[in-house]
Image: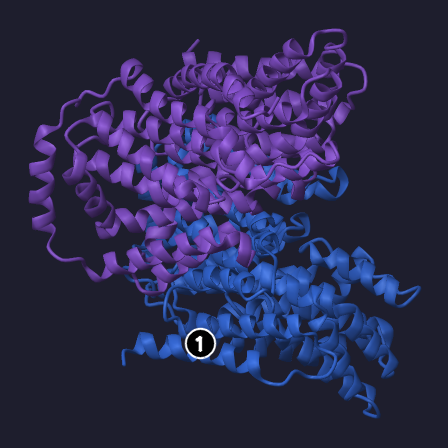
Chain colours: A blue, B purple
Amino acid sequence: MSPKLKKSLFTVFIGAAMWFSPMPAGVTTQAWHLLAIFVSTIIGFILNPIPIGAIAFTSITLSVILNVLKPAEALSGFADTTIWLIVSAFLFAKGFIKTGLGRRIAYNIMHAIGDSTLKLAYALALSDVIIAPATPSNTARAGGILFPIVRSLASAFDSEPDKGPRRIGAFLMMSAFQVNCVTSAMFLTSMSPNPLIASLAAKAVPGLELTWGMWALTASVPAILSVIAVPYVLYKVYPPEIKRTPEAKVLAAKELEKMGPMSMGEKVVSLVFVLCLTLWATASMTKLDATNIAMIGVSIMLWTNTLTWDDVISDKAAWDAMIWMGSLVCLAGFLTKFGLIALFAKAVSASLAGIPWLVSLLILLLVYMYTHYFFASTSAHVTAMYAAFLTVAIVAGAPPYLAAFSLAFMSGLYCGLTHYGNGPASIYFGAGFMPQGTFWKLGFIVSVVNVTIWLTVGPVWWKVIGLW
Amino acid sequence: MSPKLKKSLFTVFIGAAMWFSPMPAGVTTQAWHLLAIFVSTIIGFILNPIPIGAIAFTSITLSVILNVLKPAEALSGFADTTIWLIVSAFLFAKGFIKTGLGRRIAYNIMHAIGDSTLKLAYALALSDVIIAPATPSNTARAGGILFPIVRSLASAFDSEPDKGPRRIGAFLMMSAFQVNCVTSAMFLTSMSPNPLIASLAAKAVPGLELTWGMWALTASVPAILSVIAVPYVLYKVYPPEIKRTPEAKVLAAKELEKMGPMSMGEKVVSLVFVLCLTLWATASMTKLDATNIAMIGVSIMLWTNTLTWDDVISDKAAWDAMIWMGSLVCLAGFLTKFGLIALFAKAVSASLAGIPWLVSLLILLLVYMYTHYFFASTSAHVTAMYAAFLTVAIVAGAPPYLAAFSLAFMSGLYCGLTHYGNGPASIYFGAGFMPQGTFWKLGFIVSVVNVTIWLTVGPVWWKVIGLW
């Protein structure tokens, strides 16, 4: 039996076994069957008998034929605004790469501080921290802004998905992605689910108000430590082959000279970039949608011929992400809608009775953190579990602000666990620089680093500022 | 000023002029603005300053930024089941072409009767008539079954979009498409909006029952005449360069010999084809969704490696169709939802007061027929106008069954007018064998032929069978 067939059969077997096994009390047949399909999909993603897009496509097909979802429901993920922000981000990045603007920016960074790979990673991290408070869409921040630069840096060092990915590309991708997760937790406005969290907290516990300033102050110390630690840890456990890059400055100067003055295309992309950045930064006032802003950027590039229509329809990575992420967003969304997640949260909270609040909160935080393996969207996870877990923690005796903020921060940090956990994950993974196993392993290692920092140094800092 | 810039400015000008011009009474601002965007989009489609996909993408982007649609609404077309039936049909066709099964079938037809191009067109038409009653999805019938054969026939005669499209491909594509529109009107079960029509008629006029047998009998004579006339007219006004194909039989025999026995891939595609055909034919009993059936077919091809995932994500034509058709389905859907179409129907009916019913019915039929230029979906058009027009006709004094059936038949025939009028249109147009202007011109000519047959011979036949 071929390994592919073995993996395929095992994937199907897990799904079938769950499908026909007895259901826990309170779970509807439909919800249980959807869970069987979802778990089987995740197994398929891990074993990879065929590409994940094909697995995801099959899963939504099966969800209809097996009478779990209606035809229109199964396709609903393809109209998701997050999905089209990701598609637009891919196209955005294409403009950066195609016109050479990405390379120009990358060479400028290299020229300024690029004498070591680790310094490059920190330069990227610093940029992320600076723009994070102004970009409530972490997907746009990653896909539209930092990913194209990382992608261009990799190319500049001759590191491509199919040729020397470990030279420098894989490390920088992973570092940029994990830093994005940290900066997402850092500000009320650095990730769109954060305002949702604030509103959920206020609803769950009257008077509990998570303000912008309080959020930034509370997150500051552990976040800065994480931003420093994450690139360094990745540098140690997942070292790039190129470490010292003394020739980089010279090379960068030479390349910049070779590129000459900015082309029309580069100017258009620069303007679109500044326009989108401004629109994203002011989105909370203008009420403009992050996806729509990205689509405006793509439209401008199309009308100015900076991107051709053929660039769009031949962007395989975009369509790949659209299908697998759209399918997964759909399945995960219906898991929540069918009440399975709420039921799970309830089961967890029941088992916490009679345990000291510190232990309860710790368990809740870890469960909340690591259940993200089952979510394809931060918003879905937050919507499903945040309010329930916060309530349980407070009932168990935890100080409200401590519980509210620590759970809030996990919501950014857990995005780093998988390649489907949020928008940036699928962009950095979709670039193809590392296999899924590596992505998950590094994601787990970084999660341990982050959890350790945020749950040891964090509480001390929070005691200092009087949070509890 | 470059022609592209001129066309772009004119497209924008029309939209802006409508946007700021005074609104007719009863139209909401939102509906009027959407109409301005829609009309501008159609102008853009006609003038083509940039590819239609880019125009459609810009239109839905504008609809959000201009506050006409919500972000999620603007993307809703991408989750439309018709859109994914089209995407699946493209992938289905890829299986036919890639494995060579399409070529094998084509060579077999050629071998049997292929001594002239016109006979080939009739062979395709006959196949369509035979499978039509069993395929309630005309998109599946076109995209999944006949289009791949037409596509393969074109390739076999060395006629490609970019190399000799007029040799044979363009003619066969147009003939197959227009015949598909005729067969769509032919049976209650040959197009999914037909059952909808029957239900709308029953609701509008109590006791008015359009049965399967009555439908087939009423349509039979004009439909058979149309199936005979349409390929012939197209053959005259849009002649293929290759006319006599005496060498085709010999060539076909040779090619079939060269191909040898069927490959594994061909067998899989054949089985998938028979399976989907069976499922489509029994869909009214099993209640299976046509899109889901096509997706099952694609899934099977993916798991058997008959199609690779790369085949899927690199199918530019599929993603092109998805974006422009999805955008248009969305805009057209909201035109209806905002009540603009209903208002239009009302305005038309008001102007018919005091006119003899025969004249009224004729005007209603022609208006109903040619307003399809404004629709990207048969279902939307039927939903918006059929019941209103039927009511008006009956109020004007037309015999109910005559009015109900003649309006019903137009619903199939008008699909041939544009390249976005229904699913098959976008498939045959998307294949790239003819420019949009030609597609519209031929669509209009065939519409005149069809309207003439159905509204002259038709009424005589309907008198004979006692319909009025």
Residue A296: x, y in percent?
A: 58, 34
The three-letter amino acid code for the residue at tag 1 is Thr
The relative height of residue A61 versus residue A271 in the rendered view (above or below) is below
Q: Nearer the viewer, residue A294 or B256?
A: B256
Residue B124: x, y in percent?
A: 30, 35
x 38%, y 35%: residue: A310
The image quarter in which residue B269 lies:
bottom left
The relative height of residue B23 versus residue A144 in the rendered view (above or below) is above
The relative height of residue B245 versus residue A65 in the rendered view (above or below) is above
x 34%, y 40%: residue: B146
Q: Quadrant of the C terminus of chain A?
A: bottom right
Residue B377: x, y in percent?
A: 55, 33
Q: Chain of mark 1?
A: A
Q: Residues within 10 Å of mark 1 (few under 14, many from 20)?
A: many
Q: Is residue B306 visible?
A: no
Q: Is residue B175 left or right of residue A359?
A: left
Q: Is residue B116 left or right of residue B460?
A: left
Circle 1: element type: helix
Which residue is label 1 attached to?
A11
